[in-house]
Image (tube, helix red, strand yellow):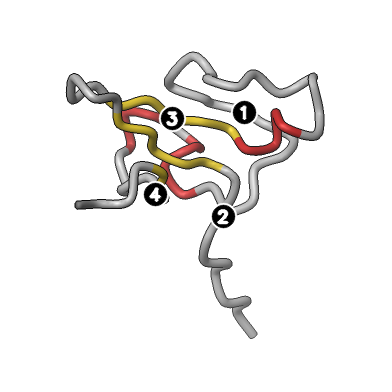
Amino acid sequence: MPDPISPPKPNPAVGLCSDCLHARTIESAKGSSFLLCQRSATDPSYPKYPRLPVLSCPGHEPVSKPESHR
C-alpha cells in the first residue's frame, strides 16, 4: 500500500507547491488528492491546503536547489 503522505509529483498546474520541500500529497480513501502545506503546522499564516496554483510563497523551498553557475 502506498504511503498516504508523500512528496508531490512535479506538476506545473499546482505552481510552487510542485517542487516545495514542505508540500505533501494527501490521498483520501475515495481517491481524491490534496496538497498539504506542512508549514501550516507551525505557522498559522500558511494555509493547510492552499488554493492552487500557488504563484508566490515566502516559505517556498525547492526540494532540489539549482546548482549555482560560475
Label at residue 62: 2
Badge 2 marks a residue whose secondary structure is: loop
Q: Residues within 10 Å of mark 2 (few under 14, many from 20)?
A: some
Q: In the rendered image, which residue does mark 1 sit on? A: 56
Where is residue 66 shown, x and y percent of the image? 54, 69
Where is residue 23 shown, x and y percent of the image? 52, 41
Q: How many numbered marks, from 0 up?
A: 4
Q: Earlier in the sequence, mark 3 or mark 1?
A: 3
Q: Amino acid at mark 3?
A: Leu
Label at residue 6: 4
- Distance from disc 1 to disc 2, alpha carbons, whole Å, reads 13 Å
Q: Earlier in the sequence, mark 1 or mark 2?
A: 1
Q: Amino acid at mark 1?
A: Ser
Badge 4 marks a residue whose secondary structure is: strand
Badge 1 marks a residue whose secondary structure is: loop
Q: Nearer the viewer, residue 37 or 52?
A: 37
Q: Earlier in the sequence, mark 2 or mark 4?
A: 4
Where is residue 28 shown, x and y percent of the image? 29, 25
- Please tell me which residue is depicted at 18% across the width and 25% down the height of the picture: 31
Q: Are marks 1 and 4 in contact (CB under 8 Å)?
A: no
- Please tell me which residue is depicted at 74% across the width and 35% down the height of the picture: 58
Label at residue 15: none
Q: Earlier in the sequence, mark 1 or mark 4?
A: 4
Q: In the rendered image, which residue does mark 3 sit on? A: 35
